[in-house]
Amino acid sequence: MTRVVEIPASFDDRAMDQFAAAIGPWPAEGRLLFDARQAAWASPYGLVAMLTAGQALAEGGAEKPLFTVPANADVAGYWARMRFFEFAAEFFELHGKVPKVRIGTSDALLESTPIRAAEDVHGAVERISQSATRILVNDLGLQSNAAMGFSMALSEACQNIVEHAGTSGWVAAQAYTYRRRLGGRRVVVIAVSDCGVGFRKTLEAQQARKLGDRWRDGTAIESALVHAVSRFRDPGRGQGLGFIRKYVSRWDGKISVRSGTARLALVPSWDDEEPLAEHLPYFPGSQVQVTIPGAPAT
Amino acid sequence: MIAHVQVATVLREAVAAPYTNLVTRSTGARVREQIEAVHAPESSHVTVLDFSEIALLDCSCADEIVAKLAFDAEGQARRLVVLRGLRDDQREAIEHVLVRRGAAVLKLDGCDAESVGELPLEALLLVAARLGGGEAMA
């Protein structure tokens, strides 16, 4: 039997729980049809989350799911320029008109990019470094060291896939305008997602006994993000998320980490998300979003 | 003996690619191994790392190259590391990893010396003098 998973009409980090709930328990039973016909927009987070779902189903041996392309040509065109369909074709049976686009015609900071090894992190950093300064300094009115920090944050977030996920993952980045939050200011967003083992399993050997029955997805994320706990004994490890935390705090940004059934966010004053959300619908692996707002208008 | 290392040159040799960004732990480890193969701590008490042609330095690379060249796994100093040609963002990455290790290295900008990390400048300058690092600061 085929079950329909409706893609949220506006798919950003806030719609992730709706997406995870629509998929249901894992491993998903029966064949899934991801219906994006009514989709009106997707952030980098939404795009990499859909690729992650497809990859997780493929790695779990599920029947190749169906995927209907957005009916709106502009939306489908944007997803194509973000290289979504190029990679989605590996995991989904695509139905509908997939726009043909020339590679390199996107104005994205970074299109959907697979992260399989350290070389891919190098590639992503090389590409984003070229546009980060232009967008963060010229478009968002930030200082040039914000652009360097942005590329470093991307590097550290992607390395977590290579070092800990146990499988490959995805990254995308984009600048866009917040309509409801921040009074319509521009933001830049990095979204990183994988369908790997997740924070709880990665840190289980070090932390589970120490935290006893408090050990769950939320405390696992907290261990890594707030206390810089790493599965390695080397004192130099576990600093990547710590650096990102410092970076977002300096630029009044936000980091949100979802893994398994929990999400922990370091929430700036301009956002109203709960810092910790638990008992969420399960989604495999880990999803990280870094958001840096532009300078306020003077 | 004082070893002078142009980090960008070592990076190109280590990864056999025209990268100017020092990112990822594996790349950092390869760069450090390349430096150590030429300048072992027994023969190079002072190592000057010149970052002037490096674009980006992330924390993982900063830890693998700077922290591990300077300190062993127990936190004992292996050599004095002196940094040259360092930009503010690169300095921040290095400071971030050294503070966690409770360690420091010396940064030189022309004739100005500065401690990067947890130790006061005076302590580092004493170590530099003991190891014959005056030449590195000339």
Image (spheres, grey):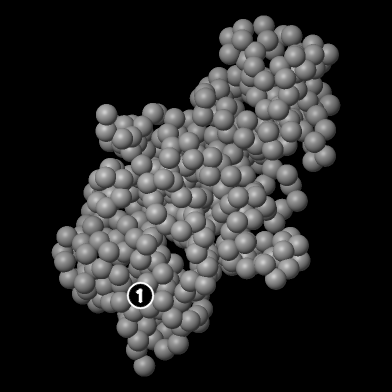
Identify the residue under disc 1. A92
Q: Front-most of A202 and A105?
A: A202
Kind of element beneath mark 1: loop
Across and down, in percent, residue A23 comes to 41, 78
- Neighbour tally class for label 1: few under 14, some 14-19, many 20 plus, Cα within 10 Å: many
What residue sits 74% from the left and 60% below the top?
A206
Across and down, in percent, residue A17 comes to 41, 69
Specify the quadrant that holds the N terminus of chain A. Answer: bottom left
Residue A66 shows up from this direction: yes
Q: Front-most of B39 and A209?
A: A209
Specify the quadrant that holds the C terminus of chain A. Answer: top left
What residue sits 17% from the left and 70% below the top?
A71
The quadrant in which residue B63 appears is top right
Q: Front-most of A197 and A82?
A: A197
What residue sits 35% from the left and 56% below the top?
A44
Indicate whether A113 appears above or below A260.
above
Furthest residue in direction left, as rendered: A73
Q: Is residue A210 left or right of residue B13?
A: right
Indicate whether A274 appears above or below B76.
below
Q: Is residue A47 left or right of residue A287?
A: left
What residue sits 63% from the left and 30% below the top?
B95
Across and down, in percent, residue A100 comes to 20, 61
Across and down, in percent, residue A116 comes to 51, 58
The quadrant in which residue A210 appears is bottom right
Inspect the image, locate mark 1, and give the three-letter code of the amino acid beneath it: Phe
Chain bearing tag 1 is: A
